[in-house]
Image (cartoon, rainbow, N blue to C red):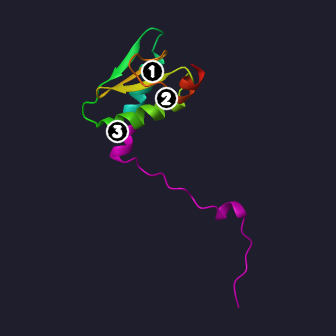
Amino acid sequence: MAKIKTVELASLVPVKKERKLSARQIALMKRESEYEKAINKLEQGNALAFEPTDEKLPTLRASLQRVIGRNERAAELHFAILGGVAYVALEPIPGARRSRQAKKLG
């Protein structure tokens, strides 16, 4: 015969373990927080130049695209890569390719 007892449903919920962040995740968070701070300080008439030092250009591009996507001014920001340097500005970047939407309008 089985032992029968009453159990609260809340006690059956599995406890989620807190995992440590990997070194790669910590580096990503640190890098993106620096980019966010710089982009938030960006003013009209200026552009930010992000020159890759210890990271490769595709990594820089992916990080900047994530940061720009989360930014409250994402619709106003322009992003381009010219000569291996990434630029972010509040107005169109000279020498950058125009977006599809801009080509249709103009």
Which residue sits at x=45%, y=15%? 41
> Which amino acid type is marked by label 2?
Ile
Residue 60 in the image, given as x and y percentages of width and height? 35, 34
The one of 97 and 39 positioned closer to us in this rendering:
97
Q: Quadrant of the N terminus?
A: bottom right
Residue 39: image tag: 1
Residue 38 place in picture, x, y as percent: 41, 20
Work out whether mark 2 precedes mark 1 in sequence or the reverse, and give the earlier one.
1
**Pointers 2 and 1 in contact (C-beta within 8 Å):** yes
Q: For the image shown, how many numbered marks are present on the structure? A: 3
**Magenta stretch prevailing secondary structure:** loop
Q: Is residue 13 above or below residue 81?
A: below
Q: Secondary structure at mark 1?
A: helix
- In magenta, the rendered stretch is 1-30
* Label 3 to label 1: alpha-carbon separation: 19 Å
**What is the spatial separation of the Cα atoms under label 3 and label 2, in whole angstroms?**
15 Å
Question: Which residue is painted at 48% across and 51% down in the image?
Answer: 18
- Residue for badge 3: 58
Question: Residue farthest to the left?
Answer: 53
